Amino acid sequence: MNEHSPSHIKETVMPLGACEPSEEQKDGAEIADTTCARAPIGLLAELTHRCPLQCPYCSNPVELERANTELTTEEWQSVMRQAAELGILQIHLSGGEPTARRDVVDIIKAASECGLYTNLITAAVLLKREQLEKLKEAGLDHVQISIQDTDARPENADRIGGYKGGSAKKKVVAGWVRELGLPLTINAPIHRHNVDNVAGIINYAVELGADRVEIAHVQYYAWALMNRASLMPTREQFNESAKIVEKAREDLKGIIVIDSVVPDYYAKYPKPCMGGWGRGIINITPSGRVLPCHASESITGLDFDNIRDKPLAEIWLNGDAFQKYRGTDWMKEPCRTCPRHEIDFGGCRCQAFALTGDAANTDPACSLSPLHEQWAKVADVESHNASPEFVYRRPGGASRKPGMQKSPATSEA
Ligand code: SF4
Ligand code: SF4
Protein backbone atom coordinates (compact mmCIF):
# COMPACT_ATOMS: atom_id res chain seq x y z
CA MET A 1 0.00 0.00 0.00
CA ASN A 2 1.78 3.08 -1.19
CA GLU A 3 0.60 6.61 -1.11
CA HIS A 4 -2.45 6.25 -3.31
CA SER A 5 -4.07 3.57 -1.29
CA PRO A 6 -6.69 4.80 1.14
CA SER A 7 -5.54 2.78 4.14
CA HIS A 8 -8.17 4.27 6.42
CA ILE A 9 -11.11 2.70 4.58
CA LYS A 10 -13.16 0.99 7.24
CA GLU A 11 -14.79 -2.36 6.67
CA THR A 12 -18.53 -1.91 6.43
CA VAL A 13 -21.05 -4.31 4.98
CA MET A 14 -23.75 -2.64 2.95
CA PRO A 15 -26.78 -4.21 1.33
CA LEU A 16 -26.51 -4.17 -2.41
CA GLY A 17 -29.19 -2.73 -4.63
CA ALA A 18 -30.61 -0.25 -2.15
CA CYS A 19 -30.92 2.36 -4.89
CA GLU A 20 -32.86 2.48 -8.11
CA PRO A 21 -30.89 1.11 -11.09
CA SER A 22 -29.06 3.76 -13.11
CA GLU A 23 -29.76 4.49 -16.78
CA GLU A 24 -26.55 2.65 -17.55
CA GLN A 25 -27.77 -0.33 -15.55
CA LYS A 26 -31.18 -0.28 -17.17
CA ASP A 27 -29.56 -0.32 -20.60
CA GLY A 28 -26.92 -2.83 -19.70
CA ALA A 29 -26.85 -6.57 -19.45
CA GLU A 30 -28.76 -8.43 -16.79
CA ILE A 31 -27.50 -7.96 -13.24
CA ALA A 32 -26.86 -11.13 -11.26
CA ASP A 33 -28.79 -12.04 -8.13
CA THR A 34 -27.56 -9.56 -5.55
CA THR A 35 -28.97 -11.12 -2.42
CA CYS A 36 -25.78 -12.96 -1.55
CA ALA A 37 -23.43 -10.16 -2.58
CA ARG A 38 -22.21 -7.22 -0.55
CA ALA A 39 -21.66 -3.76 -1.87
CA PRO A 40 -18.14 -2.40 -2.12
CA ILE A 41 -17.44 0.33 0.39
CA GLY A 42 -14.88 2.35 -1.53
CA LEU A 43 -13.89 3.24 -5.05
CA LEU A 44 -10.41 4.40 -5.93
CA ALA A 45 -10.69 6.61 -9.01
CA GLU A 46 -7.34 7.05 -10.73
CA LEU A 47 -8.29 10.14 -12.72
CA THR A 48 -4.97 10.32 -14.55
CA HIS A 49 -1.50 8.83 -14.44
CA ARG A 50 0.02 12.26 -15.11
CA CYS A 51 2.01 13.51 -12.14
CA PRO A 52 4.73 16.11 -11.69
CA LEU A 53 6.48 13.94 -9.09
CA GLN A 54 8.53 10.86 -9.95
CA CYS A 55 8.52 8.78 -6.77
CA PRO A 56 10.54 5.57 -7.06
CA TYR A 57 7.89 3.69 -5.00
CA CYS A 58 4.87 4.82 -7.02
CA SER A 59 2.10 2.22 -7.01
CA ASN A 60 0.99 3.12 -10.55
CA PRO A 61 1.80 0.46 -13.14
CA VAL A 62 5.20 0.65 -14.79
CA GLU A 63 3.35 1.12 -18.11
CA LEU A 64 1.56 4.39 -17.37
CA GLU A 65 -1.67 5.17 -19.21
CA ARG A 66 -1.57 8.09 -21.64
CA ALA A 67 -3.61 11.29 -21.28
CA ASN A 68 -5.42 10.73 -24.58
CA THR A 69 -6.96 7.47 -23.28
CA GLU A 70 -8.45 9.01 -20.10
CA LEU A 71 -12.18 8.90 -19.35
CA THR A 72 -13.99 12.14 -20.13
CA THR A 73 -15.63 14.35 -17.53
CA GLU A 74 -19.04 12.90 -18.37
CA GLU A 75 -17.74 9.35 -18.11
CA TRP A 76 -16.29 10.00 -14.64
CA GLN A 77 -19.52 11.68 -13.58
CA SER A 78 -21.41 8.59 -14.71
CA VAL A 79 -18.99 6.44 -12.66
CA MET A 80 -19.87 8.51 -9.59
CA ARG A 81 -23.61 8.02 -10.09
CA GLN A 82 -23.19 4.30 -10.67
CA ALA A 83 -20.97 4.02 -7.59
CA ALA A 84 -23.61 5.65 -5.39
CA GLU A 85 -26.31 3.40 -6.81
CA LEU A 86 -24.16 0.35 -6.11
CA GLY A 87 -23.95 1.32 -2.44
CA ILE A 88 -20.40 2.64 -2.40
CA LEU A 89 -19.82 5.18 0.37
CA GLN A 90 -16.40 6.66 -0.27
CA ILE A 91 -14.67 7.91 -3.41
CA HIS A 92 -10.91 8.31 -3.28
CA LEU A 93 -9.78 10.57 -6.12
CA SER A 94 -6.29 9.60 -6.91
CA GLY A 95 -3.83 9.31 -9.76
CA GLY A 96 -1.09 10.10 -10.65
CA GLU A 97 -2.04 13.55 -9.52
CA PRO A 98 -5.83 14.04 -9.67
CA THR A 99 -5.56 17.85 -9.76
CA ALA A 100 -3.66 17.56 -13.04
CA ARG A 101 -7.19 17.27 -14.48
CA ARG A 102 -8.91 20.64 -14.63
CA ASP A 103 -12.31 18.95 -14.39
CA VAL A 104 -11.61 17.54 -10.92
CA VAL A 105 -14.09 20.08 -9.49
CA ASP A 106 -16.87 18.82 -11.81
CA ILE A 107 -16.13 15.21 -10.91
CA ILE A 108 -16.18 15.92 -7.16
CA LYS A 109 -19.41 17.89 -7.56
CA ALA A 110 -21.04 14.91 -9.26
CA ALA A 111 -19.86 12.58 -6.49
CA SER A 112 -21.01 14.91 -3.76
CA GLU A 113 -24.44 15.38 -5.33
CA CYS A 114 -24.88 11.58 -5.13
CA GLY A 115 -24.08 11.70 -1.41
CA LEU A 116 -20.64 10.12 -1.73
CA TYR A 117 -17.86 10.96 0.74
CA THR A 118 -14.96 12.34 -1.30
CA ASN A 119 -11.29 12.13 -0.45
CA LEU A 120 -8.70 13.90 -2.59
CA ILE A 121 -5.40 11.99 -2.54
CA THR A 122 -2.86 14.52 -3.74
CA ALA A 123 0.84 15.29 -3.92
CA ALA A 124 -0.39 18.92 -3.52
CA VAL A 125 2.28 20.67 -5.59
CA LEU A 126 -0.11 21.73 -8.38
CA LEU A 127 -2.88 23.03 -6.13
CA LYS A 128 -3.77 26.71 -5.98
CA ARG A 129 -5.75 28.14 -3.08
CA GLU A 130 -8.59 29.26 -5.36
CA GLN A 131 -8.87 25.75 -6.77
CA LEU A 132 -8.99 24.24 -3.29
CA GLU A 133 -11.78 26.66 -2.38
CA LYS A 134 -13.72 25.56 -5.47
CA LEU A 135 -13.19 21.91 -4.54
CA LYS A 136 -14.59 22.60 -1.09
CA GLU A 137 -17.60 24.42 -2.57
CA ALA A 138 -18.12 21.41 -4.86
CA GLY A 139 -18.45 19.21 -1.78
CA LEU A 140 -14.95 17.84 -1.14
CA ASP A 141 -14.93 16.15 2.29
CA HIS A 142 -11.32 15.26 3.00
CA VAL A 143 -7.77 15.83 1.76
CA GLN A 144 -4.85 13.41 1.96
CA ILE A 145 -1.43 14.91 1.21
CA SER A 146 1.56 12.70 0.63
CA ILE A 147 4.96 13.77 1.89
CA GLN A 148 8.42 12.39 1.25
CA ASP A 149 10.09 13.78 4.41
CA THR A 150 9.75 16.76 6.78
CA ASP A 151 10.34 20.44 6.01
CA ALA A 152 13.52 20.19 8.09
CA ARG A 153 14.95 17.94 5.37
CA PRO A 154 13.62 19.50 2.14
CA GLU A 155 16.54 18.37 -0.01
CA ASN A 156 15.88 14.75 0.92
CA ALA A 157 12.13 15.12 0.32
CA ASP A 158 12.64 16.75 -3.07
CA ARG A 159 15.25 14.19 -4.08
CA ILE A 160 12.90 11.29 -3.29
CA GLY A 161 9.96 12.84 -5.16
CA GLY A 162 12.12 14.17 -7.99
CA TYR A 163 10.45 17.58 -7.70
CA LYS A 164 12.27 20.73 -6.60
CA GLY A 165 10.40 22.87 -4.11
CA GLY A 166 7.78 20.16 -3.53
CA SER A 167 8.33 19.94 0.21
CA ALA A 168 7.77 23.68 0.74
CA LYS A 169 4.65 23.75 -1.45
CA LYS A 170 3.07 20.82 0.40
CA LYS A 171 3.42 22.71 3.68
CA VAL A 172 1.64 25.74 2.20
CA VAL A 173 -1.20 23.60 0.82
CA ALA A 174 -1.61 21.76 4.14
CA GLY A 175 -2.08 25.19 5.74
CA TRP A 176 -4.82 26.08 3.23
CA VAL A 177 -6.58 22.78 3.89
CA ARG A 178 -6.76 23.55 7.60
CA GLU A 179 -7.76 27.19 7.04
CA LEU A 180 -10.68 25.96 4.94
CA GLY A 181 -11.71 23.60 7.71
CA LEU A 182 -11.19 20.40 5.74
CA PRO A 183 -9.98 17.26 7.55
CA LEU A 184 -6.38 16.43 6.67
CA THR A 185 -4.45 13.17 6.51
CA ILE A 186 -0.72 13.12 5.93
CA ASN A 187 0.53 10.02 4.15
CA ALA A 188 4.22 9.23 4.46
CA PRO A 189 5.57 6.27 2.49
CA ILE A 190 8.46 4.95 4.59
CA HIS A 191 11.63 3.36 3.25
CA ARG A 192 15.34 3.34 3.77
CA HIS A 193 15.76 7.05 2.87
CA ASN A 194 13.43 8.40 5.57
CA VAL A 195 12.97 5.54 8.08
CA ASP A 196 15.39 7.31 10.42
CA ASN A 197 12.95 10.23 10.65
CA VAL A 198 9.65 8.53 11.57
CA ALA A 199 9.42 10.48 14.85
CA GLY A 200 10.08 13.72 12.95
CA ILE A 201 7.40 12.86 10.36
CA ILE A 202 4.78 12.20 13.04
CA ASN A 203 5.60 15.48 14.79
CA TYR A 204 5.52 17.31 11.46
CA ALA A 205 2.02 15.92 10.76
CA VAL A 206 0.92 17.28 14.16
CA GLU A 207 2.50 20.65 13.32
CA LEU A 208 0.60 20.70 10.01
CA GLY A 209 -2.66 20.21 11.89
CA ALA A 210 -3.39 16.77 10.47
CA ASP A 211 -6.10 14.63 12.04
CA ARG A 212 -4.35 11.48 10.92
CA VAL A 213 -0.92 10.37 9.75
CA GLU A 214 -0.17 7.18 7.85
CA ILE A 215 3.28 5.74 8.47
CA ALA A 216 3.05 3.52 5.43
CA HIS A 217 6.05 1.29 4.86
CA VAL A 218 6.41 0.90 1.12
CA GLN A 219 4.82 -2.19 -0.42
CA TYR A 220 6.96 -3.68 -3.13
CA TYR A 221 4.89 -3.72 -6.32
CA ALA A 222 5.31 -1.88 -9.61
CA TRP A 223 7.91 0.93 -9.36
CA ALA A 224 8.72 -0.02 -5.77
CA LEU A 225 9.57 -3.58 -6.81
CA MET A 226 11.92 -2.14 -9.43
CA ASN A 227 13.51 -0.03 -6.67
CA ARG A 228 13.38 -2.60 -3.89
CA ALA A 229 17.17 -2.73 -3.40
CA SER A 230 17.23 1.07 -2.99
CA LEU A 231 14.21 1.31 -0.71
CA MET A 232 14.24 -1.71 1.60
CA PRO A 233 15.03 -0.79 5.23
CA THR A 234 16.79 -3.31 7.45
CA ARG A 235 14.76 -5.34 9.92
CA GLU A 236 16.40 -3.37 12.75
CA GLN A 237 15.34 -0.07 11.15
CA PHE A 238 11.80 -1.36 10.76
CA ASN A 239 11.65 -2.60 14.37
CA GLU A 240 12.90 0.76 15.63
CA SER A 241 10.28 2.61 13.56
CA ALA A 242 7.54 0.33 14.93
CA LYS A 243 8.59 1.18 18.50
CA ILE A 244 8.49 4.90 17.69
CA VAL A 245 4.97 4.54 16.27
CA GLU A 246 3.77 2.66 19.36
CA LYS A 247 5.16 5.28 21.72
CA ALA A 248 3.79 8.16 19.65
CA ARG A 249 0.34 6.55 19.70
CA GLU A 250 0.40 6.71 23.48
CA ASP A 251 1.93 10.18 23.69
CA LEU A 252 -0.35 11.72 21.06
CA LYS A 253 -3.65 10.07 22.00
CA GLY A 254 -6.46 12.53 21.30
CA ILE A 255 -4.15 14.73 19.21
CA ILE A 256 -3.59 12.68 16.07
CA VAL A 257 -4.50 9.20 14.83
CA ILE A 258 -1.47 7.22 13.69
CA ASP A 259 -2.00 4.43 11.16
CA SER A 260 0.87 2.18 10.29
CA VAL A 261 1.41 -0.20 7.42
CA VAL A 262 4.01 -2.89 8.07
CA PRO A 263 6.36 -3.99 5.27
CA ASP A 264 5.34 -7.48 4.15
CA TYR A 265 8.93 -8.66 4.11
CA TYR A 266 9.18 -8.35 7.89
CA ALA A 267 5.73 -9.66 8.81
CA LYS A 268 4.77 -13.12 10.06
CA TYR A 269 1.43 -13.18 8.25
CA PRO A 270 0.34 -11.18 5.22
CA LYS A 271 -2.19 -8.37 5.26
CA PRO A 272 -5.70 -9.01 3.97
CA CYS A 273 -4.83 -7.23 0.75
CA MET A 274 -7.63 -4.78 -0.22
CA GLY A 275 -9.63 -6.36 2.63
CA GLY A 276 -9.96 -9.47 0.44
CA TRP A 277 -10.09 -9.64 -3.36
CA GLY A 278 -13.36 -8.29 -4.78
CA ARG A 279 -14.74 -7.82 -1.28
CA GLY A 280 -14.86 -4.12 -0.59
CA ILE A 281 -12.87 -1.99 -3.01
CA ILE A 282 -13.01 -1.17 -6.71
CA ASN A 283 -10.20 0.57 -8.58
CA ILE A 284 -10.78 2.31 -11.90
CA THR A 285 -7.79 3.27 -14.04
CA PRO A 286 -7.61 6.53 -16.03
CA SER A 287 -8.81 4.77 -19.19
CA GLY A 288 -11.73 3.07 -17.40
CA ARG A 289 -10.39 -0.41 -16.68
CA VAL A 290 -12.15 -1.74 -13.57
CA LEU A 291 -9.80 -3.61 -11.22
CA PRO A 292 -10.14 -5.46 -7.90
CA CYS A 293 -6.89 -3.77 -6.79
CA HIS A 294 -4.63 -1.11 -8.27
CA ALA A 295 -1.81 -3.60 -8.91
CA SER A 296 -3.93 -6.41 -10.35
CA GLU A 297 -3.01 -5.67 -13.97
CA SER A 298 0.40 -7.14 -13.12
CA ILE A 299 -1.27 -10.59 -13.08
CA THR A 300 -1.22 -11.85 -16.65
CA GLY A 301 -4.20 -13.79 -17.97
CA LEU A 302 -6.89 -11.85 -16.08
CA ASP A 303 -9.63 -10.29 -18.17
CA PHE A 304 -10.47 -6.76 -16.99
CA ASP A 305 -13.70 -5.06 -18.04
CA ASN A 306 -13.91 -1.41 -19.00
CA ILE A 307 -16.52 0.95 -17.60
CA ARG A 308 -17.02 2.23 -21.16
CA ASP A 309 -18.42 -1.20 -22.10
CA LYS A 310 -20.40 -2.43 -19.07
CA PRO A 311 -22.22 -1.02 -16.02
CA LEU A 312 -20.22 -0.89 -12.81
CA ALA A 313 -22.66 -3.16 -10.93
CA GLU A 314 -22.35 -5.88 -13.55
CA ILE A 315 -18.56 -5.74 -13.49
CA TRP A 316 -18.50 -5.85 -9.68
CA LEU A 317 -20.85 -8.82 -9.49
CA ASN A 318 -19.87 -10.88 -12.52
CA GLY A 319 -16.60 -9.58 -13.93
CA ASP A 320 -14.04 -12.35 -14.55
CA ALA A 321 -11.28 -10.51 -12.73
CA PHE A 322 -13.46 -9.94 -9.65
CA GLN A 323 -14.75 -13.51 -9.54
CA LYS A 324 -11.38 -15.17 -10.03
CA TYR A 325 -10.05 -14.77 -6.47
CA ARG A 326 -13.19 -13.73 -4.61
CA GLY A 327 -13.95 -15.71 -1.45
CA THR A 328 -11.86 -18.76 -0.57
CA ASP A 329 -12.79 -21.51 -3.08
CA TRP A 330 -9.80 -20.78 -5.33
CA MET A 331 -7.26 -21.34 -2.53
CA LYS A 332 -4.58 -24.01 -2.54
CA GLU A 333 -2.78 -25.42 0.48
CA PRO A 334 -1.62 -24.20 2.96
CA CYS A 335 -4.29 -21.47 2.76
CA ARG A 336 -7.22 -23.78 1.96
CA THR A 337 -7.26 -25.42 5.39
CA CYS A 338 -5.64 -22.60 7.36
CA PRO A 339 -7.75 -21.08 10.19
CA ARG A 340 -6.66 -17.59 9.07
CA HIS A 341 -7.97 -17.86 5.53
CA GLU A 342 -10.95 -15.62 6.17
CA ILE A 343 -8.78 -13.20 8.09
CA ASP A 344 -6.10 -12.45 5.51
CA PHE A 345 -7.53 -14.18 2.40
CA GLY A 346 -4.12 -15.64 1.61
CA GLY A 347 -2.45 -12.22 1.37
CA CYS A 348 -1.73 -10.42 -1.85
CA ARG A 349 -2.48 -12.11 -5.18
CA CYS A 350 -0.22 -9.74 -7.10
CA GLN A 351 2.71 -10.49 -4.82
CA ALA A 352 2.02 -14.24 -5.04
CA PHE A 353 2.01 -13.97 -8.84
CA ALA A 354 5.14 -11.80 -9.03
CA LEU A 355 7.15 -14.09 -6.77
CA THR A 356 5.77 -17.57 -7.50
CA GLY A 357 4.27 -17.26 -11.00
CA ASP A 358 0.81 -18.34 -9.77
CA ALA A 359 -1.55 -15.82 -8.19
CA ALA A 360 -3.43 -18.65 -6.42
CA ASN A 361 -0.37 -19.58 -4.37
CA THR A 362 0.09 -18.43 -0.79
CA ASP A 363 1.63 -14.96 -0.63
CA PRO A 364 5.34 -15.51 0.25
CA ALA A 365 4.87 -12.82 2.92
CA CYS A 366 3.28 -15.61 4.97
CA SER A 367 5.65 -17.57 7.19
CA LEU A 368 3.72 -20.73 6.18
CA SER A 369 4.62 -20.28 2.51
CA PRO A 370 7.39 -22.63 1.34
CA LEU A 371 9.05 -19.59 -0.26
CA HIS A 372 8.97 -17.37 2.80
CA GLU A 373 12.50 -18.01 4.09
CA GLN A 374 14.09 -17.42 0.72
CA TRP A 375 12.02 -14.29 0.23
CA ALA A 376 12.84 -12.81 3.64
CA LYS A 377 16.52 -13.42 2.93
CA VAL A 378 16.35 -11.25 -0.19
CA ALA A 379 15.16 -8.36 1.95
CA ASP A 380 17.89 -8.98 4.48
CA VAL A 381 20.64 -9.00 1.85
CA GLU A 382 19.34 -6.03 -0.15
CA SER A 383 18.75 -3.86 2.89
CA HIS A 384 22.33 -4.33 4.07
CA ASN A 385 23.93 -3.62 0.68
CA ALA A 386 24.67 -0.10 -0.53
CA SER A 387 21.56 1.54 -1.95
CA PRO A 388 21.57 1.71 -5.76
CA GLU A 389 20.39 4.96 -7.37
CA PHE A 390 16.64 5.33 -7.72
CA VAL A 391 14.88 4.40 -10.93
CA TYR A 392 12.48 7.35 -11.11
CA ARG A 393 8.88 6.93 -12.21
CA ARG A 394 8.51 8.59 -15.59
CA PRO A 395 5.98 8.34 -18.38
CA GLY A 396 7.58 6.75 -21.41
CA GLY A 397 10.28 4.96 -19.44
CA ALA A 398 12.17 4.81 -16.19
CA SER A 399 15.07 7.14 -15.52
CA ARG A 400 17.93 7.23 -13.06
CA LYS A 401 17.92 11.03 -13.35
CA PRO A 402 14.95 12.74 -11.73
CA GLY A 403 15.18 15.84 -13.95
CA MET A 404 13.74 17.75 -10.96
CA GLN A 405 10.57 18.84 -12.73
CA LYS A 406 8.90 22.02 -11.67
CA SER A 407 6.40 22.74 -14.42
CA PRO A 408 2.70 22.11 -13.82
CA ALA A 409 1.40 19.00 -15.56
CA THR A 410 -2.15 20.25 -16.02
CA SER A 411 -4.26 19.71 -19.11
CA GLU A 412 -7.66 20.62 -20.44
CA ALA A 413 -9.00 17.17 -19.56
S1 SF4 B 1 4.91 9.80 -8.62
FE1 SF4 B 1 4.62 10.03 -6.39
S2 SF4 B 1 3.12 11.63 -6.16
FE2 SF4 B 1 3.04 10.94 -8.29
S3 SF4 B 1 1.46 9.40 -8.41
FE3 SF4 B 1 3.33 8.30 -8.01
S4 SF4 B 1 3.56 8.15 -5.77
FE4 SF4 B 1 1.99 9.68 -6.21
S1 SF4 C 1 -1.40 -19.97 5.01
FE1 SF4 C 1 -2.67 -18.58 3.82
S2 SF4 C 1 -4.49 -18.17 5.07
FE2 SF4 C 1 -2.91 -19.09 6.42
S3 SF4 C 1 -1.85 -17.34 7.34
FE3 SF4 C 1 -0.70 -17.91 5.50
S4 SF4 C 1 -1.54 -16.64 3.87
FE4 SF4 C 1 -3.00 -16.58 5.58
Image (spheres, rainbow, N blue to C red):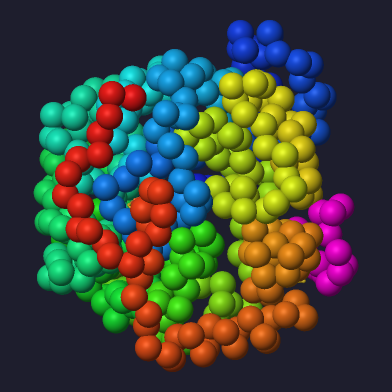
Given residues 245 and 392, the one toward you in this image is: 392
The location of residue 360, given as percent across then percent down, is 79, 60
The location of residue 368, given as percent across then percent down, is 75, 79
Residue 205 in sight from this viewpoint: no
What residue is at 67 percent from the left and 70 percent from the top? 355
Given residues 25 and 36, the one toward you in this image is: 25
The location of residue 260, given as percent across then percent down, is 43, 66
What residue is at 77 percent from the left and 62 percent from the top? 358
**Residue 404 is one of the magenta-drawn residues:** no
What residue is at 20 percent from the left and 58 percent from the top? 404
Give the quarter of the figure containing the C terminus: top left
Which residues, given as a range, are shown in magenta?
328-343
**Residue 330 is one of the magenta-drawn residues:** yes
Q: Main secondary structure of the magenta part?
A: loop
Compared with residue 273, is residue 28 higher up or lower down, i.e. above or below?
Answer: above
Compared across the picture, whether 343 is left or right of 214 comes to right
What is the quadrant of residue 47 in the picture?
top left
Compared across the picture, whether 245 is left or right of 132 comes to right
The location of residue 306, given as percent across then percent down, is 62, 29
Compared with residue 248, is residue 12 higher up or lower down, i.e. above or below?
Answer: above
What residue is at 13 percent from the left and 35 percent from the top? 129
Compared across the picture, whether 370 is left or right of 86 comes to right
Compared with residue 234, is residue 334 higher up or lower down, i.e. above or below?
Answer: above
